Image (cartoon, rainbow, N blue to C red):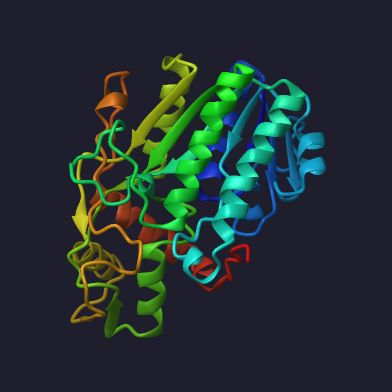
Amino acid sequence: MKAFVTGGAGFIGSHIVDKLMKEYDKNKNQVVVYDNLCTGQKSFLQEHIGKSNFQLIEADVLDYQKLKESMKGSDFVFHLQANADVRGGIKNTKIDLEQNILATHNVLEAMRESNIKKLLFSSSGTVYGEPKKFPTHETSELIQTSLYGASKASAESIIQAYCEYFEINSWIFRFVSFIGERYTHGVIFDFMKKLKENPSQLEILGDGTQRKSYLHVQDGVNAMFTAIKKAKDKKNIFNVGHNDYVNVVKVADLICDEMGLSNITYKFTGGDRGWVGDQPFVHLDVTKLKTIGWKPTISIERGIRRTVKYLKDNEYLLYKRILFKK
């Protein structure tokens, strides 16, 4: 198989690349990573660079001609490139349109012109907005509360239409927040950076009661490959999350403990959410994945501690400017 991975130098994408490359001896995979390195890191792919079956192309999915040319000859597209700054749409209302909707359309058009029939798409649990039922099932209504969530829902719809028109098979995954090694943005990243700057006080957005589910990236990647192997419908949609959830104060407590900090004063900004469009409660129903043989193996607490340890060992990431596309 020749796999084409957009965003393959990113947090989740690089772990998918690892999985594809690990299978090389058995399946003779060729892997092409297509990434503008806006948030991705070459260092995440270092063990693969220079191998005969691996290629890194530094380019943007909005460059359609380059994308189409680079994708030719591929069998399977793993589309993970996206705007990863969930709050970015508040200040830049075009970013989710361009990086999530138009970029996905470019990927689908390049697939159509190259006659590629398999697509994995990284969606998000934000497509549910603020659901009334928890844990939230894949059949729940999609009511948008953020431009990010709306862009992911729109991309899902476009993908499903292309599946009907052009006989493409798709696997769409609605993620909770992934954590783990190579983590470069999110609540753990933000808290650690704040604590490095002021180890006696931590600002927490909202009132700390927000409840979120988190999943270690290793479990997430295993979930996706399990679904690709076992789910054979034309259009496959799966929630990817954990059985459990924790509130933001618990996350802060675990980070402080793993960093060896004590007597930290928490300063809350107030309100039941961190920002406009934030989801006060995220807990996805993963029964559908469990029925095909997957389950999470790493607890949320262990996942958070592993993430903190990784960032402590790779502290440069806390100070490396992650360039979200503007």
Q: Nearer the viewer, residue 302 or 217?
A: 217
**Which residue does the image show at 70% across and 43% down from the upper left?**
34
**Which residue does the image show at 26% across and 76% down from the upper left?**
261
State how many labels appear. Answer: 0
Residue 127 visible at all:
yes
The quadrant of the image that shows the C terminus is bottom right
Residue 293 in which image quadrant: top left
Q: Is residue 324 left or right of residue 123?
A: right
Residue 281: x and y, percent?
Answer: 22, 54
Q: Is residue 321 left or right of residue 280?
A: right
Residue 139 in which image quadrant: top left
The quadrant of the image that shows the N terminus is top right
With respect to residue 183, does 133 lie above or below? above
**Which residue does the image show at 64% across and 59% down from the upper left?**
38
With respect to residue 17, does 277 lie above or below? below
Residue 324: x and y, percent?
Answer: 59, 64
With respect to residue 254, does 206 lie above or below? below
Q: Nearer the viewer, residue 236 or 8?
A: 236
**Which residue does the image show at 31% across and 40% down from the upper left?**
241
Residue 19 visible at all:
no
Q: Is residue 110 left or right of residue 15?
A: right
Residue 142: x and y, percent?
Answer: 34, 42
Residue 24: x and y, percent?
Answer: 63, 24
